[in-house]
Image (cartoon, grey):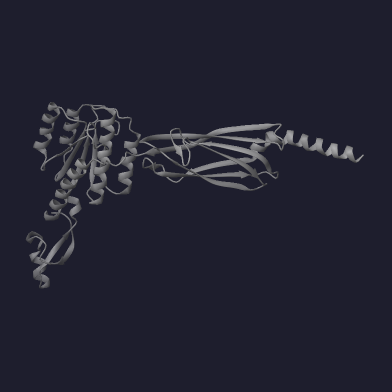
Amino acid sequence: MSRLIIYGIIIMILLMQVLITPRISRHLFLSFSFDTELAEPGEKIICNCRLNNFWFLPVVYMRLYEFMPEGAVVSGRKDNKQSHRIFLLPYSSYDHKIIFTLPKRGVYRNGKYYMETGDFWGFKSNILSDIIKANLVAMPRRCEDEFVINALGGYIGDISVRRFIMEDPVLTMGYLDYTGREPMKKISWKHSAKVGKLMVKNSDYTVDATAAIVLNMERGSVKEKEKSLEIVRTICEQLEAEHIPYQFISNGDIGSLKEGYGKIHFERLMTKMGKSVLCSYFSFDKLIEKCIREQKKNCSYFVVSAPLRDQDRETLTRLQRFSEYEICVLEAEVNKDVAC
């Protein structure tokens, strides 16, 4: 009699497992969130994952396979996959993190997961799969070419000097005591007479020095265009450090960006460059004509391109005639020992 009872219990458990297994996944909820959408190539990104069991029964067996966006590399592995074996109590959750990197510039969209649930003995299993929604962008790398860095340092230094010695004719923020180091033209004789000592104007000089980054995508190899993007990023970072507003103009799929500076402005441009497929829409001649039409007072030009041809240099002379300052031309050469 006791044996019959034991056999009956086993049969009931088996039947329950057969009936329950297909229904387990209906009561599970898996969510993902990423700590950033824009990253450096090689920068660690964290994906926070949570698996909730909203059922009154435990999940006795589960195997979870998670695939980050194609091309990503999970930390400690050579591919984009991570797996877990999980036992989950009723009304409980399982939290974990996936740390991965994006190895090169580009867009990384949507991963995928597979969730396998089964019974105690492995007689029956059920597999559920779905996408992991993601839209991650890796921006261009920083340029490490010493020639480019040195050229930029000197040119941007000249912009900073110019905006210091040129008084803003529009915006005066207040007055400061004369220390002897300020240029004579900044002394406010009217205000000095009023207070009885020499005073100088405190101008918001950031409004009278601007820059335009001009990117030519008409020609060049993939490596030269990639290096061009790296040069643009380096220019942006140095201008940001000096609080110099800049606009971006290109003849490629990156488009253009109005003048500005700051974290949002910088990240917007880095995102556009990260998504670029390096195609061009119109010629270098038309790009220069666009710059001439949209030129602004006290604007310094940075022209970034694959190595220029003689006819391209002739085109640049037109822009130089309309520019108040010398143009900084940076060519993305890759057939050198030093590469970005």
Q: Is residue 132 visible?
A: yes
| Percent coordinates x, y for residue 174 in the rendering | 18, 63
| Percent coordinates x, y for residue 310 in the rendering | 12, 27
Q: Dividing the image into 4 quarters, which one contains the N terminus? A: top right
Rendered residue at 62%/42% (across/down) = 86
Rendered residue at 34%/36% (across/down) = 274
* Residue farthest to the front, as pictured: 337
Rendered residue at 62%/32% (across/down) = 127
Q: Is residue 255 visible?
A: no
For the residue pair 192 and 20, the one nearer the viewer reads as: 20
Q: Which quarter of the picture shows residue 231?
A: top left
| Percent coordinates x, y for residue 9 in the rendering | 83, 39
- Image vertical order of residue 294 relative to residue 171, above or below: above
Q: Dividing the image into 4 quarters, which one contains the C terminus? A: top left
Q: Which quarter of the picture shows residue 170?
A: bottom left
* Residue farthest to the right, as pictured: 1
